[in-house]
Amino acid sequence: MNLNQTAALFRLDAALNRMAVTFQGMTAHPDEHNCECHWGSAEELAQLKLPDAELDLDLLRRTWQATDWNDHASVLRRILPQLSRALVSGLVEPLFGMEEVGRAFALGQWQQWPAEQAAAVREFLNGWWASTLIDADPAVPAHEVLALCAEASATLSPWLHVWEAQTCGVADQHLTEAVVHWEYDLLGDQLPWRSWDNEEEIRTELTAWLIRHAPARLHAGNAPVELLHRIRLLSLAGPARWEDPHWPGHRY
C-alpha cells in the first residue's frame, strides 16, 4: 500500500468516525409512521425511534429506500452511521443502481442541515470517492459511487474534477471500466443512471468530460481500440455517429 492509499484510507476512516459521532443518538420523529403492509412492522418502526441500535440489513435497506417518510431528514440522520459503513463495505444492494441511495440522501436535504452535520456528510462522500478512485478492488465500482455522489449532491462537476486530478493507473482503470459500463447509454444520448432531475444537463457534462479526458487515459491503460472509438463517436451527432464504420450496432 502506497502513501496515497494510506492517506485516503485514513481520511475515509476519519470520515466514518465523524459520521458516527455527529449522528450518535439520533432518532426518527416520535410520530413517524409507515405502511405495515409495504414497509414493515410496528416493532421495526419502533427501532428507528431508539438511538444507535443496529438494524438488520434488510430493515436498513427498506428504511433508506422508502420515499414517503413524513420527516425524511430525521430518518436519514438515524441510519447514517450504519448506512455509511454499509456503503463502504459493499453491503448495500439497491434494486437498480447506487443512484437510488444518492436520492435517499437528497430527499433528506442534508445540505440544508446544521453546518456540523452537513460537513460530516460532505466529508464522508468526498472521502469515500477519493478512496475508491485509488483502490484497485473497491467494494463498490467507481462508476456506481460517482452516480451516488452526483445524485446526493445534485451536481456532477466536483466529482469529475477529483477524478481528473487523480491520474494514477488505478484511477485510469476505473475510468476504462466506467466507459465500458456507460458507452451504450451515452451513445443513445441517455444518462447511464436514472437521475432525479437535470438529467440532460448531467449527461451533457459527463459526455463532454469523457471526450476531453478519457482518450489519453484509456490509451495509456491499453484499453481496447474499439472502446476508444466509442469515445470518439460521442463527439459525433446524428447520422455521422451511427453511419460511422465503427458504430457498434447498438439498437435503442
Image: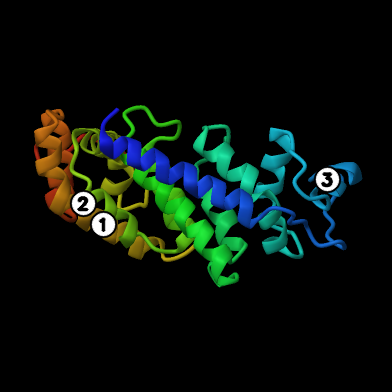
Q: Are marks 3 and 2 in contact (CB under 8 Å)?
A: no
223 and 204: which one is in front? 223
Quadrant holding the N terminus: top left
Q: Which amino acid does label 2 sit on?
A: Ala
Measured along the vertical axis of the image, is residue 18 above or below residue 200? above
Secondary structure of the residue carrying tag 1 is: helix
Residue identifier under label 2: 165
Asked which secondary structure carries label 2, the reply is: helix
Give the spatial CA distance, label 2 vs label 1: 6 Å
Nearer-N-terminus badge (3/2):
3
Residue receiving disc 1: 161
Label 3 amino acid? Gln
Whether residue 153 is situated above or below residue 45 in the rendered picture:
below
Q: Please report the residue visible at 26 percent of the width from the left and 49 percent of the height from the top.
A: 163
Instruction: Give percent across and percent down for residue 81.
Output: 63, 47
Q: What residue type is labelled 1?
A: His
Where residue 47 is drawn, which disc sits there?
A: 3
